[in-house]
Image: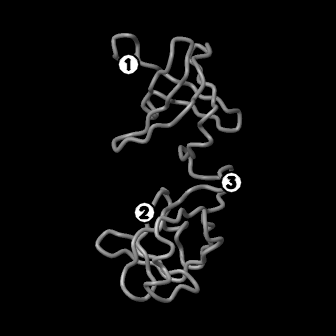
Amino acid sequence: MRLLVGRIGRAHGILGEATIEVRTDDPENRFAIGARLQTDKHGELKIISGRVHNGILLIGFEGITDRNGIEKFKDTLLYSDVDIDAESEEDDYHVLQLIGCIAYLESGEKFGEVSDVVNLPGQDLLAIITAHGETLIPFVHQLVPVVDIKAKRMTVIPPDLTGEVI
């Protein structure tokens, strides 16, 4: 699957490097030297250098050797081919794997369907469409104890009407 992993920002220096706005949780692999990224406007780019400077990722691409060359790529979106179904660490899910999962209560009763994952600084929230509207549930093990990606189902413990956890 082709996933958005970053955006090329401003040119940095005179050797064709650019700042990268990272939009992936795995920048070490997505922006590794030798990686090939697709773009929304300019075909494929191969990474030939990468470093962090003052907390900002700087990348150099094959065939781009000066500031004028990289400035043409400003605001270009970068995509990577990612196998979201590949074996990953336990409790490590991609948003696209979670959307469409059916959420069940511990009793086995259907609760709703995951429509989105809201990424917040403290934690992610599952947006679940139920018969009564949308419910947001923190995506933590205590409230979502079972996730079966292959079966597209999960067990949830939603908050009750008073806002307390059941």
Along the line of sight, the residue nearer the viewer: 31 or 40: 40
Residue for badge 1: 165
Q: How far from the left and from the top, in percent, is residue 20?
A: 43, 68
Asked whether the viewer can see residue 30, the reply is yes
Instruction: Kindly identify the residue that appears in the image at 45 percent across and 77 percent down.
Output: 71
Along the line of sight, the residue nearer the viewer: 102 or 46: 46
Task: Give the number of the disc on residue 1.
Answer: 3
Q: How far from the left and from the top, in percent, is residue 125?
A: 44, 34
Position of 97 relative to 130 (above/below) = below
How packed mark 2 is, by other alpha carbons closer than 10 Å (few <14, some 14-19, many 20 or more), is some
The type of residue carrying mark 1 is Val
The answer to the question of whether label 1 and label 2 lie on touching residues, with beta carbons closer than 8 A, is: no
Counting residues from the N terminus, which is met first, the one under dot 1 or under dot 2? 2
The type of residue carrying mark 3 is Met
Residue for badge 2: 21
Q: Quarter of the image containing the C terminus?
A: top left
Query: The residue tagged with tag 2: helix, strand or loop?
Result: strand
The residues bearing labels 1 and 2 have C-alpha atoms spaced at a distance of: 37 Å
Asked whether the viewer can see residue 140, the reply is no
The residues bearing labels 3 and 2 have C-alpha atoms spaced at a distance of: 21 Å
Eye-nearest disc, 3 or 2 = 2
Eye-nearest disc, 1 or 3 = 3
Q: How far from the left and from the top, in percent, is residue 52?
A: 37, 74
How packed mark 3 is, by other alpha carbons closer than 10 Å (few <14, some 14-19, many 20 or more), is few
Horizontal arrangement in the rendering, residue 12 relative to residue 41 (left or right) = left
The residues bearing labels 1 and 3 have C-alpha atoms spaced at a distance of: 36 Å
Coloring scheme used: one colour
Q: Quarter of the image containing the N terminus?
A: bottom right
Query: The residue tagged with tag 3: helix, strand or loop?
Result: loop
Instruction: Kindly identify the residue that appears in the image at 68 percent across and 49 percent down.
Output: 85
